[in-house]
Image: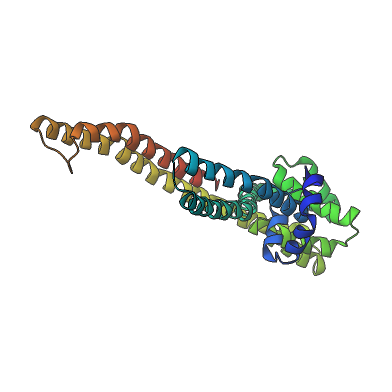
Amino acid sequence: MSSFSYAIAGQLAKRLSRRAGVFKDIYYTAGFSEPFDAYLSRCITAYLFTAPAVTITAFVLHSLILRYPPLFSAILTFLLLIIYSLLFLAFVLYYPVYRRYARGLKIDSRIPYTISYFAALAAAGMGIEALMERIAEVEDVKEVAREFALFLTDVKVLGFDVLTALERRSRMSPSIMLSLFFAGLRDTYITVGNLYEYAAFMARRLMELKRYTLRSVLNSISMVAEVYITLMVAAPLMFVTMLAIMGMLGGTIAGFPPQLIILILLIVGIPTSAIAVLLMLDGILSRV
């Protein structure tokens, strides 16, 4: 698929890649294994194949099924094609940003413990390359292990020196915490060279930040629990009781019978509220 799409849109992808700017850096910090040009060529090829299908389907729907005049069908088809193009472009641009953000969250939730282990190994007098290699081997979270393995790739495969490799990892890490750690590790390596003192200091600070984050998460979960009780228990009970009384008295609300509003509340309102609460919990727990 990659070779096929690159053969179709490779030249256009190269021209767009030279103008990508910051987005290209975001792409490489998102953890993709394929080059940026290959990603662009795949997206362009997908659009070239799907856009005609969307256009033909929309025109057939408007002209043959809905029986609109040909000119009106063409205008509606063109508008739908514009909407599809904008949505496709938004997905192409947003997906690497979302993936970078997700990787950063995974790294941030794990990095205090990783740096603590780094400090314990540094206390034994291990060199920086041996430290990186050991952490890349034993780290359970693959996103963290990948960042340390990339340092080894820069040094052993690409031939960069330790300082340049640390600067590259600091610049290309999706996690602000890990980026700061690599930047500080580079400065420590240049100046005093005591990796243990620096790693222990960073571990203590990140553990304090972790405890603060956990307290914040607990407070947020308590707030979500109160919202859940209000939306899922108290509010439906109150509204159903009020609407049932209005139904017995023969009243209406904006011309709709209370029985219909109760049905909408039970079928649409309560499930929607439950989904909203689940999304809130997912957003809060993703920081842990």
Q: Nearer the viewer, residue 250 or 274?
A: 250
Q: x, y (%) of residue 231?
A: 31, 40
Q: Quadrant of residue 255?
A: top left
Q: Is residue 248 visible?
A: yes
* Image quadrant occupied by the N terminus: top right
The colouring scheme, among rainbow, by chain, secondary structure or one colour, is rainbow
Tell whether 102 sits left or right of 228. Answer: right
Tell whether 151 sits left or right of 106. Answer: right
Q: Nearer the viewer, residue 76 or 161?
A: 76
Tell whether 155 sits left or right of 229. Answer: right
* Image quadrant occupied by the C terminus: top right
Q: x, y (%) of residue 238?
A: 21, 37
Q: Residue at x 90, y 53 (%)?
A: 157
Find the residue positioned furthest to the bottom.
191
Q: x, y (%) of residue 61?
A: 50, 41
Q: Nearer the viewer, residue 280 or 192?
A: 280
Q: Quadrant of residue 97?
A: bottom right
Tell whether 97 sits left or right of 80. Answer: right
243 shown above or below 9: above
Q: Residue at x 81, y 54 (%)?
A: 151
145 shown above or below 204: above
Q: Nearer the viewer, residue 89 or 191?
A: 89
Q: x, y (%) of residue 201?
A: 67, 59
How many badges with numbers are in the image? 0
Q: Is residue 182 visible?
A: no
Q: Residue at x 30, y 32 (%)?
A: 266
